[in-house]
Image (cartoon, rainbow, N blue to C red):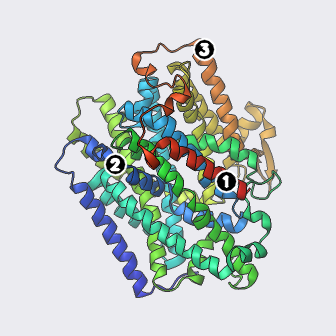
Amino acid sequence: MRLAIHPIDIVIVIAYLVGIVALGCWGGLRQRKSSKGSDYFLAGKSLSWTIIGLALFSTNISTIHLVSLAQEGYVNGLAYGNFEWMAAFTLIALSLFFAPFYIRANVATLPDFLEKRYSRSCRDWLAIVSIISAIFIHIGFSLYTGAVVLEGLFGFNIMLSIIAVAVLTGIYTIVGGLMAVVLTESIQTIILLIGAVCITAIGFLKVGGWSGLAASVDPVKLTLLRSSSDPAGLPWYSVFLGYPIIGLWYWCADQTIVQRVLGAKDENHARVGPLFAAFIKILPVFIFVLPGTICLGLINQGILPNTLSKSEDTYAFLITQILPIGLRGVVAAALLAALMSTVSGALNSIATLFSYDIVKRWRPETSDRALVNTGRIVTFVAMIAAIAWSPCVSHFKSIFQGVTVMICYIAPPITTVFLWGIFTRRASARGAILTLWWGFALGFVVFLLDWFKSAPVPHAAQIVLRDWLHAGFLLTVKDGQYVTSWTIPPMMATFYLFVICSVILGIVSWLKPQKHTPETEALIWKNPLDALRSKAWPGIGNYKLLSAIVFVTMVLLYTIFR
């Protein structure tokens, strides 16, 4: 299924590409006169709450969301909208509990914060893992998904699309640093929302509004909280137990996301920005997930032909069937906006991590100018690595579920050391580093078990599992080949891993307690209520009031769509 490219659509797409690259380079070149590393990596700590909120949303939303959430909406209804709405609660946690310490500690990276709270070894570990996760999760999945969509719509070769988008995004990210990233992300968020709203609005009208949709699909598809027997495989308890673990890592402890907060003007901007993003996160359920369910309703009503052979083509199918010429170009630009914003944000965070947490860590005398040049080189290298990895994403059955699986097994140890690190002084440096290493090892083992449950287990691994460990119960025969017998859903596995990591941290910290300094004491909430005692802006800009509004709004939404 390919979309005939009309000249108007081509003009819109080309104008977008030229404009966004030019804007990014211009924004970064404005600060080229300054040799300060903070200007390149943290936009000179000049970001306002509006820019932070828009940039947080734009970095988070990628082609994975546009394509895979529509796919999940078509197959499973609104169930996977939980990943969007639950994010609002973790953004409240970022605003109230994490952002203040990041700003007060005056850190450029989250590994830097981990060193101030625990030790240098913790910093080194997190820096390396953060770089790896940015390449494999944020960039790799986004590039591949975007390329698949461009192939489906316009017939572009997947590898050529991956290379072209990576190069264009890399240009303004290398030239302009974080200022270029957040400027372009702000524009891209607007374009992204316009494109997504167009598809939702037109589809919603065609299906006959909410009543027409409800009458044409199974009622359970319009709910978010499901039972354990639901085919979506996302029961309500796994959402409430598992999502906070991956959400706290993603929104509160992942450099790619939190770097926008680190560039805030002051603490209040750092607090209000995430809350603004939390409000915007209400939209994806309606503009990314719902279109897939609307597509199913339109097919069931006979308004659209029943020719959708692959569910991953749901978004492209909607574009070809319901959008007029011109709007197709806008939506294509929105797809590129989602892709480029995520990739640019991840590339900039990789450059910052490598420059501050590896180069500056081992060569403290390195000048800011040298750091910036190093960051540009690393951005280029990371882009090449991501291009090489991207095609491997095709292994996963569903792209969105694939990225969720990877996050589920990376997040538990990091969430553990950050969460208990700011809420209890008992968490020690020795306990933290052992938790990170053991948690990562356990997560990697579980990831392999999950990976090979649908693919043949290599012969060498079979020998280890069956003969050395005498753990043949982990293997089963499928189509004449050994696969793993792993059946625990990723969201529950991440909760169990978090519990194990918390136990490790608690026991080791009890045996090897932390010798606190005034600096480490300043990075621990003696009482969680202390987070509400910082001076806030008056009126509607008060972060405490905004947090309460976000919380109540999300509870009401869950009550309505339960």
Numbered label tally: 3
Residue at the disc numbered 1:
556
Residue drawn at x 57%, y 35% is 415
Residue nearest the viewer, comparing 205 with 168: 205
Q: CA distance from mark 3 to mark 1?
A: 41 Å
Q: CA distance from mark 3 to mark 2?
A: 41 Å
Q: Three-letter amino acid code at disc 3?
A: Trp
Give the quarter of the image for residue 174.
bottom left
Element at label 1? helix
Residue 4 spot, x, y in % from top left: 50, 86
Q: Three-letter amino acid code at disc 2?
A: Leu
Element at label 2? loop
Residue at the disc numbered 2:
47
Give above or below for 428 relative to 238.
above
Q: Nearer the viewer, mark 3 or mark 2?
A: 2
Residue at the disc numbered 3:
510
Circles 3 and 1, Cβ within 8 Å, touching? The answer is: no
Residue 189 visible from this viewpoint: yes
Quadrant, the C terminus: bottom right
Residue 421 spot, x, y in % from top left: 53, 26
Q: Nearer the viewer, mark 2 or mark 1?
A: 1
Circles 3 and 2, Cβ within 8 Å, touching? The answer is: no
Which badge, 3 or 2, comes first in the chain's sequence? 2
Which badge, 2 or 1, comes first in the chain's sequence? 2
Quadrant, the N terminus: bottom right
Residue nearest the viewer, comparing 98 with 209: 209
Q: Three-letter amino acid code at disc 1?
A: Leu
Which badge, 3 or 1, comes first in the chain's sequence? 3
Is residue 210 toward the left or the right of residue 435 in the image?
right
Q: Residues within 10 Å of mark 2 (few under 14, many from 20)?
A: many
Residue 395 spot, x, y in % from top left: 62, 58
